[in-house]
Amino acid sequence: MNRSLLIPFLSSMIFAGCQAGPVHLNTAASADAWFVDSASVSIRQKNFPIPDSLPVKPVSTAIAGIDTPVIRMTCPETGLQYSLGLRTPKGWDVSKKYPLIVYLHGGNGSDRDDKGSRAWDMYSFIADTIPVFVASPSANRYAPWWTAAGMERVLQAVRYMTLHYPIDPDRIILAGVSDGAAGCFLAAQTIPAPFAGFIAVSGYGGILTQFNIPIIPEDMQTRPFLVLNNGNDRIYPAVQTKDFAAQLKAAGVNLAFRMNDTALHGFDYKMLERDSICALIDRWRKPHVRNVIWAALPQLPICTDNIVTAKFDPAVQVPLIRAEFKGDVIELNSSGVNEVIFALPSGIPVPKACLVNAKKFPVEDISTKPEARAMRVAHFNSPTPPECNLVRIVIKKGD
């Protein structure tokens, strides 16, 4: 793979909608946060789903006491419906918190909108071993994983599960096979905030560059990766996938890479990886990042640490944001950013001013505005988000 595909962070430039289903939790107090009048919220991207007014009752089955419903979802951006399949752990207890695996299936090229209905079965080998929820949204040729619609479906799966089930918000893992593995690499660059880590199997992140999506290793550095590729993969040759993983590691990504020398494309050897994946689920936790270093991809959803949303200069392909929260001042070094809303880390008070590329700008405290709760719900991907201060910084054009 050409090293030019790994886009440098340019540190010198920046100072170094889901439908209602079986509600198992008491969400009455927080359900209002999921219904937001988009006209009253100045958010460039809709980072939260708007449920349909006429929900479709899920089709539910059971396997030895395990619930496996299929939920029909609607993407608020496109209006397209698709299926979300899920599997619950046997005998789960509403008073406990459980890890969640969001699994992205392969094969985006069909017209089907229900490939996720039972795709969760790929991770039954984990769910049969430890108590874990598994959810599998559907993608297709109209909404592949490497598009905005695909990423929105990933976020909808997270938000549906955290709304309806007792999910530990610090133990959500995104996993994918083949095309779904490419989706994991993109999610790490655009919507990493909900996740503790990524498991990419039999895929190739470099395929994103074929869709004019740059690879930005610095955006992947806050979460660990497990990358498994196959020596006899005829779709993604071993030399290609091995080189891609090596370049990510050299660029500072926390990545464990293993090659199954004899395997074909797919995950037929998954039982060999059972113990290692269970260990990751036990060990991985979502990091709580104090500052911001982010190269944004404006055409895709944004759900990253401490940034609720942002507006960008359309002439800048990859806007850059670096923010340090220093008591009374935010030091913000940026390129191509017109406005940004920060969710300040826990314990950080509302600063009195913001220094944007060494120029002073006011800070607007929006923590108590009517839309603030919905913003927190969307940012933390939880119906019961932690309280934190929200601030808006508007950078005047030309500054």
Image (cartoon, rainbow, N blue to C red):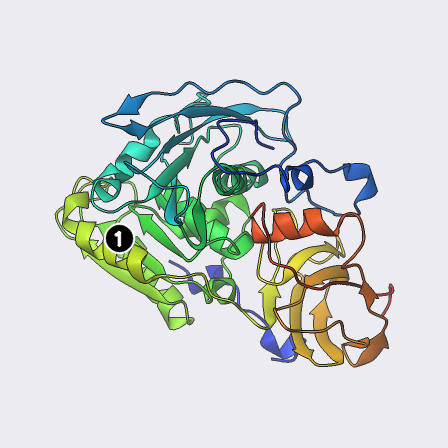
Q: In which quadrant will I find the N terminus?
A: bottom left
Rendered view: 176 above or below 242: above
**Where is mark 1, residue-wise?**
228
Q: Residue at x 54, y 52 (%)?
A: 191
Q: Is residue 242 above or below residue 93?
A: below
Q: Position of residue 324 (x, y in %)?
A: 65, 77
Which residue type does callout 1 highlight? Leu
- Vertical placement of 213 versus 392: above or below? above
Judged left or right of residue 197, residue 261 is left
Query: Image point 53% across, 40% down: which residue?
Result: 163
Q: At numbered mark 1, what does the secondary structure look like: helix, strand or loop? A: strand
* Left or right of residue 119: residue 164: right
**In-front residue for pair 181/76:** 76
Residue 79, by quadrant, is top right
Q: Say left or right for 374 vs 276.
A: right
**Place of residue 263 in the rendered image (x, y in percent of width and height, measured from the top left):** 16, 44
Q: Is residue 214 visible?
A: no
Q: Residue at x 76, y 48 (%)?
A: 371
How many residues crowd around disc 1 within 10 Å: few (fewer than 14), some, or many (20 or more)? Answer: many
On screen, residue 301 versus residue 138, left or right, reads right
Q: Judge whether residue 211 can be spotted in this image.
A: yes
